[in-house]
Amino acid sequence: MVRRLILRLPLEAIEPARLAGYAALARALDAELLAQIEEDEHLTLLANLPFITEICRSTAASRALDSHNLERQSKQLLQYLTRELQRLSDNQQLRWKLARIDATAPLQPDTDAAVLRAAPSRRYRGSRPLPRVAPHLAVVDAGDPASERALNLARQISRETQTPLLLLALPSSPWHQLDRPPQLVDAIASIAALEPASLGRLLQAWHCDLLVAPAALLGGRPQQLALPDVQLLLTP
């Protein structure tokens, strides 16, 4: 049973519009939301050097990279997220905590916690085509006990959020190359491996923005599934 949803927030993936979705996922799991802002300690060390500058993406203007500015910006972000999470808590009875964490800290869930890694959004230009299929959430299955736990958690999220569930069956899964999905699963797709490029195209075709996977399946390297627009939920 998942009692805590640990939300890892890289700075480039912090989007206020998504906070309500993270809160809804925590409520679907009946779990406390522990939001962690990832900070780069190496960047802080560089900011103490006198010859380091930063360049604004939008204006191309440059200025000295100052550690005091970094700390001030970090505190402002922490205060903003605190206000937003408090607002969501007042409206939706959300249990939450907020902290800062080193970006290099491992993404390893505890036995009673799942880890959600936020992903940056693609920046689309113009209008996006309407989806041909309903948005799904996806879960990876390798036929082991950890995959069974991930599948049960994905079923819970699917039921609580009323989102169709897509099962991605690896060759070791008993559902690999089968057309009929297991109980409480809406669709099935057989995959040869967790290869980012092909997996990204598949998830895009099914309009999946949440991928549930056992942490052990990734061998301590969750960055291999760092896909744009896809939040990665690691289960124990």
Image (spheres, grey):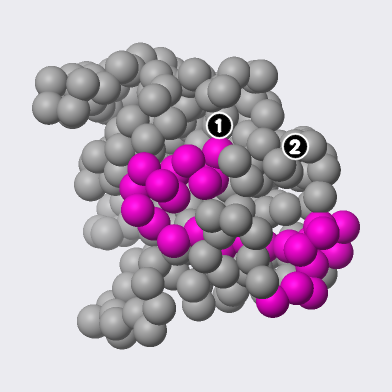
Q: Is residue 207 above or below residue 221?
A: below
| Quarter of the figure with residue 13 | top left
Residues rendered magenta in the picture:
153-179
Residue shown at the point (40%, 78%) measured from the top left? 133
Nearer to us in this view, 112 or 36: 112
Please state if 18 lies on the left or on the right of 194 as rendered. left
Instruction: Choose between 221 and 44: the one closer to the eye.
Output: 221
Residue 177 lies left or right of residue 152; in this view the side is right
Count neighbours of disc 1 (C-alpha within 10 A) and say few if under 14, some if 14 to 19, many if 20 or more.
Answer: many
Q: Which residue is pictured at 75% across the width and 73% down the height?
A: 178
Where's residue 174, x and y in %? 82, 59
Above or below: residue 226 compared with residue 110? below
Q: Quadrant of the N terminus?
A: top right
Q: Amino acid at mark 2?
A: Ala
Please tell me in which quadrant of the rendered image residue 103 appears: top right
- Residue 227 can be seen, yes or no: no
Choose the circle earlier in sequence order: 2 or 1: 1
Q: Quadrant of the C terminus?
A: top right
Residue most toward the right? 172
Q: Which mark is residue 18?
A: none
- Find out whether residue 158 is within the magenta segment: yes
Provide the residue designation for mark 2.
146
Tell me whether the residue at label 2 lies in contact with that at label 1, contact meaning CB atoms closer than 8 angstroms: no
Alpha-carbon span between mark 2 and mark 1: 14 Å
- Image: 85 above or below 23: above
- Asked whether residue 4 is in view, the answer is yes
The disc at residue 115 is 1
Q: Amino acid at mark 1?
A: Val
